Amino acid sequence: MINIDGSYGEGGGQVLRTSLSLAAITGQAVRIERIRAGRKKPGLAAQHLTAVRAVAAICHAQVKGDTLGSTSLEFVPRSAVQASQYHFDVTAAQEGGSAGAVTLVLQTILLPLAIATGNSEVTLRGGTHVPFSPPLTYIERVYLPLLRQMGVVAEVKLNAWGWYPQGGGEVQLQVRGNSKLSEINLLEKGELQQVRGLAVVTELPSHIPQRMASRAENLLSQAHLKATVTPSREKGIAPGAGIFLTAKYANTRAGFSALGRIGLAAEKAAEMVCAELLNFHDTGAPVDVHLADQLLLPATLAIEPSQYRVAEISTHLTTNAWVIEQFGVAQVNIDVSEKVVAIAPLPQIPNLKSYKPKFQT
Ligand SMILES: Nc1ncnc2c1ncn2[C@@H]1O[C@H](COP(=O)(O)OP(=O)(O)OP(=O)(O)O)[C@@H](O)[C@H]1O
């Protein structure tokens, strides 16, 4: 049994989710204590509980402590990850509903399903564009294209937008199984090829996305970046707004977002997201602060070592590296002065062809 201290570093939900993914992939049992001790309201919230249930479903795990608010969890996988059709609902995990991020649940099961035998299709319900998590637009335009470079083939379809606090969004995920992951080497981002964006509202007037889009296009063109931002009015169960930009470079992609809220002018949201993009562009680094922590797990599953240069070293990055090392599946070295992350997978897990998960009987 691997023991993980959930209060380590960032002390957030990612410690739990990475542990769950690695438990499913390696077949190792894991106990996590002090879950989300670094947060105002520690323990399992609806999104985390849904992630526990989702990973348990795909590897038939025996689980103790899977209740809302629980600060400790024991998770014992009992089979290899099963490719299949699944349905997970964050909103239903909590009385009165939840806008917990489906994208975080999606990331927890994606790599286990990608290396399973056979294809999977997953329907996820909950928040699709909510604070402190990757918006679905980021998953679609940044995360999955980068994973595709590493050999993971998956697609998402947004059936309904889900914002904070109502949630109620729906995403369809298709994952091709039997993936063999290859390493990623991203030290230079290459030429900027395209900046594109989506300014969207649900249940709000169409002048809002138009104002967000035209302010963003103007600001980016003042900075000599040619951008196309599409205003769009979509159907949703509640009002919501956001602007999502993607910068595509010769070797990489990066994504930025600003979510609307009452009292925040449409133009201000556009200014915030453009400032993020321009800051990133100026760093010269190929990997944005969020992708930096999200690429660690796929790099761990690759056959050869990976390395990439990041715009910023976050505690999410250093904490996720620590979790991976606790499972003994890779060595992660973070060169703070060069901002280069190097991941050396250890032989017991990749090459996944010869990899045999350990199961308890
Ligand atoms: N705007 C964003 N775009 C892309 N990814 C994001 C964005 N904001 C946050 N993320 C990613 O979402 C993840 C959040 O991890 P974190 O541990 O904070 O999860 P959490 O379950 O929401 O935690 P908690 O509720 O405990 O704060 C990280 O991988 C982070 O990089």
Image (cartoon, rainbow, N blue to C red):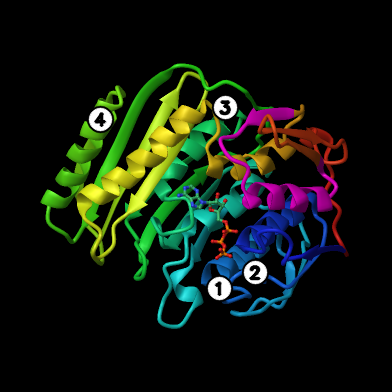
Query: Where does label 1 land, which residue?
Result: 45
Q: Which mark is residue 228?
A: 4
Give neighbour class at mark 2: few <14, some 14-19, many 20+ (Cα, 10 Å): many
* Pointers 2 and 1 in contact (C-beta within 8 Å): yes
**Which structural element holds mark 4?**
strand
Disc nearest the viewer among 3 and 1: 1
From this view, report whether residue 171 is shown above or below residue 90: above
Q: Alpha carbon of mark 4 to alpha carbon of mark 2: how far? A: 39 Å
The answer for how far apart the CA atoms under marks 1 and 4 are is 37 Å
Label disc, if present, on residue 149 of the rendered structure: 3
Quick one: SS at disc 1? Answer: loop
Query: What residue is pinned by disc 2?
Result: 36
Residue 39 visible here: yes
**Disc 1 vs disc 4: which is toward the camera?**
4
Tag 2: amino acid = Arg
Residue 85 percent across, percent down from the top left: 53, 54
Q: Is mark 1 within 8 Å of ligand 1?
A: yes
Residue 155 position within the rendered picture, expressed as x and y whole percent measured from the top left: 46, 40
Distance between mark 3 and mark 1 Cα atoms: 33 Å
Of the two numbered discs 4 and 3 on the same chain, state the one appearing first in sequence: 3
Q: CA distance from mark 4 to mark 3?
A: 24 Å
* Marks 2, 3: nearer the viewer: 2
Q: Residue at x 21, y 51 (%)?
A: 266
Callout 3: 10 Å neighbours few (<14), some, many (20+)? some
> Residue at coordinates 61% horizontally, 80% vertically from top-left?
69
Q: CA distance from mark 2 to mark 3?
A: 32 Å
Quarter occupied by the N terminus: bottom right
Q: Give the magenta part as a residue range.
A: 306-330
Residue 349 placement, left or right of 218: right
